[in-house]
Image: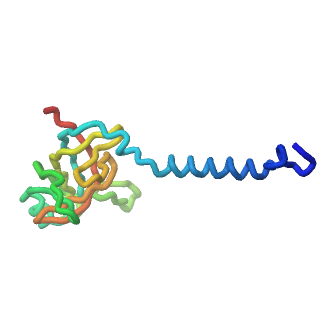
Amino acid sequence: MDKQGKIKGKFNIIDILVILLIIAMVIGIAVRFRSTVTDAVKSDVSFEYVVKIESVRDYTIKALEKKGKVTDKKSELELGEIVNVEYEPTKYQSTTADGRIVFAEQPERYTAYVTIRTQGKESENSYVLADSNELSVGGTAQIFTKYIDTTGSVISIDKIDA
């Protein structure tokens, strides 16, 4: 290093730090935008998932009970078929006058549990549907058929052995 802070007269410490910073940024961007789903996809599988749809009216239950094919709203890809619909009255938490917490039924509202059977790909942490959307427990799933368009939360996913 000479008196001006340059190494062998060409680079100084600031130049080296800028180059290292640029390299770190390129590595960071590559790691951030690398898709973990496509790297971890294992194989084609059949599975069933249950979607919980809360506080729906009677006509929604009737539309779900017609079953049918579930498709992607945009591209019309088949994403599975509704194979079972169960429902129960919706319950909500209420506080009584004496301070107790009780659960009461909400009139004319139901919680539906819709089972959908489909084909997709399995990854380490989730399943991937035909439209490339990830499906995992706790996530949101849209149900679009010729009878209904609704959204619920995925409460279970079970792999079907062939």
Say whether residue 91 is left or right of residue 1: left
For image coordinates 75% across by 52% down, the residue present is 15
From the viewer's side, name the closer residue of 4 and 44. Answer: 4
Name which quarter of the figure residue 127 lies in: top left
From the viewer's side, name the closer residue of 41 and 2. Answer: 2
Query: Picture coordinates of residue 21 (x, y %)?
Result: 67, 50
Location of residue 42 with respect to 64 vertically, above or below: above
Say whether residue 13 is left or right of residue 158: right
All told, the count of numbered labels is 0
Location of residue 149 with respect to 81 vertically, above or below: below
Query: Picture coordinates of residue 125 (x, y %)?
Result: 35, 40
- For this orientation, the residue located farthest to the front is 9
Query: Picture coordinates of residue 80 (x, y %)?
Result: 15, 51
From the viewer's side, name the closer residue of 147 and 21. Answer: 21
From the viewer's side, name the closer residue of 65 and 43. Answer: 43
Report the colour scheme: rainbow
Say whether residue 10 is left or right of residue 144: right
For image coordinates 6% across by 59% down, the residue present is 66
For image coordinates 11% across by 65% down, the residue present is 146
- For this orientation, the residue located farthest to the left is 66
For image coordinates 87% across by 43% down, the residue present is 1
- For this orientation, the residue located farthest to the top is 161
Query: Picture coordinates of residue 93 (x, y %)?
Result: 33, 57
- For this orientation, the residue located farthest to the right is 3
Q: What quarter of the picture does the C terminus occupy? A: top left
